[in-house]
Image (cartoon, grey):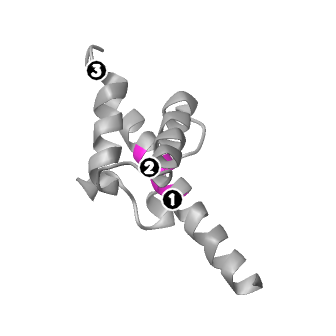
Amino acid sequence: MLRHITARPEHTPPRNQHPLFERAGIQAAQLWLQGAPLSMGEWRDLRWRNLVAGAAVLPGDEQRHDAFNQAFADQIGRFIALRSHAEVQS
């Protein structure tokens, strides 16, 4: 499930190549952070499936999926970093 999320910066795809899918990934992460009833991975995968439900399989779908997953992971990371920074400042 996490095989599409890159852990190393040299594997990160260029940003803004698929802005709609990146925005959807960010929104999915924000919703999960508000208290979704599923694990993070389950929620991410459910939101992806809902996003592409009914759409035909097209060339480039893997890159769009990667953009969604990376944006989701980045948003979770930003939240953790901001929360950690706020705790240090207190």
Is the Cβ of the residue at disc 1 closer than 8 Å to that at disc 2?
Answer: yes
- Measure the C-alpha gap from mark 3 to mark 2: 20 Å
Q: Is residue 72 magenta?
A: yes
Residue that numbered label 2 is attached to: 32
Query: In the picture shown, does residue 65 fall above or below 6?
Result: above
Question: Which part of the image, by quadrant, shows the C terminus?
Answer: bottom right
Question: Viewer-proximal residue, 81 or 83?
Answer: 83
Q: Residue 3: x percent and y percent?
A: 26, 56
Q: Quick check: 37 left or right of 29?
A: left
Mark 1: amino acid:
Ile
Q: CA distance from mark 1 to mark 2?
A: 9 Å
Q: Secondary structure at mark 3?
A: loop
Q: Could one spot residue 30 in this view of the protein? A: yes
Query: Which comes sooner in the sequence, label 1 or label 3?
Result: 3
Sequence-first tag of 3 and 2: 2
* Region of the chain picked out in magenta, as a range: 69-74
**How many neighbours does mark 1 have within 10 angstroms: few (below 14), some (14-19), or many (20 or more)?**
some
In the image, 42 versus 13, the foreground residue is 42
Residue holding disc 1: 76
Q: Amino acid at mark 3?
A: Ala
Report if residue 28 lies within the magenta region. no
Q: Is residue 40 left or right of residue 19?
A: left
| Amino acid marked by disc 2 | Trp
Q: Is residue 62 visible?
A: no
In the rendered image, residue 30, in percent from the top left (x then y), is placed at: 53, 47
